[in-house]
Amino acid sequence: MGNHGSCCRCTSKADRTNRENDYKVADGELSLKDENSANLQHISDRERNEDDDQDPSLHPTTSTMFLTRSQTIDSSRIRDGGHHIVNIDKKHRHQAINHVSSTGSLQKYSSCSTIFIDDSTVSQPNLKSTIKCVALAIYFHIKNRESELRLLDIFDERLHPLTRDSVTDDYDRHDPEHKHIYKFLRTLFNAAQLTAECAIVTLVYLERLLTYAEIDICPANWKRIVLGAVLLASKVWDDQAVWNVDYCQILKDITVEDMNELERKFLEMLQFNINVPSSVYAKYYFDLRSLADAHDLTFPSEPLSKERAQKLEAMSRISEDKFKDIVKATLKRSASLDGIVPRRSAAILS
């Protein structure tokens, strides 16, 4: 009680005033007067690069490169003051997806007796349709590439062939068709049993590589760039990753040492940045859906069965119950007049 040697020290008003003067308030935030402390940045600000805002593989609002390139119109197709652009573009679009049957696919509409639903969602995309869209995105990357950018040796198919067949002299002059890119991707995904989500991450890594390494994808390097992106995406995304030696079983003529070197160089060019935010993943998924709609690639629609309807109804009830619990917990913590429905009293007519 009367001990003056207490560990608690009561400061005077003058001491508190002098201590408060050591700080200054600027723009609503408390900062030290010390010049050295004022120049320190937060760790998140130091790690973030200003160029990330322009990188579509990192920033969720930046338009994807493949969607931008798919909308590029070749100047040689503009004739007669642009009056025939639409017809030529339709012809070009048909050539881009020439693996599709010439009969086309009929548009399905729901009726009173049958309801068609699209099973492809952002969390569970349709595998076949997603691979087709990714192949089409790569096709537009190659067709509308920038010829000024350099070609790296690690991706050059002449220096690092994937097969024992000799590479032709004009291997870097002819653009691959969409069906050839789709067949290459489908072979990798079917043999390695990869998921549709892995295909989307593959496209994210591919565009990140083009941005970081300042290269472009072309007929001479597209197979090895796609292979490196698939290899890395399968290890990052899937829990049971495919080993490099397993890809040697798919591509018979490639060695494990070549696969290891390809993976190592790919990671170095990405600056070991393999993070894919959920917002970026969702952006790429919906941009692929937009690309599919613009080029007549339809996602399969299946009729709603009785069992599927019961599952959807059960999931809806579970979500509704969770929402009700959240609302009840919120009202218990703080009740607002906005959420209270006024009780109406009976009017008395005289």
Image (cartoon, grey):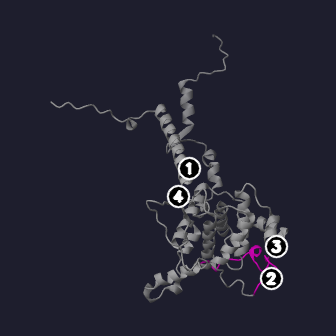
Q: Which residue is mark 1?
A: 311
Q: Which residue is mark 4?
A: 304
| Residue 186: percent from left, percent from top | 69, 70
Q: Amino acid at mark 3?
A: Lys
Name the mark nearer the viewer: 2 or 1: 1
Identity of the residue drawn at 53% across and 40% down: 24
| Residue 316: percent from left, percent from top | 52, 47
Disc 4 vs disc 2: Cβ atoms closer than 8 Å?
Answer: no
Secondary structure at badge 4 equals: loop
Is residue 155 shown in magenta? yes
Give the mark nearest the N terminus, 2 or 1. 2
Q: Which residues are magenta?
A: 144-168
Is residue 8 shown in magenta? no
Q: Is 285 placed above or below 187 here?
A: above
Secondary structure at badge 2 equals: loop
Q: Is residue 63 visible?
A: no
Q: Cα distance, mark 1 to mark 3?
A: 44 Å
Q: Is 54 placed above or below 339 here?
A: below
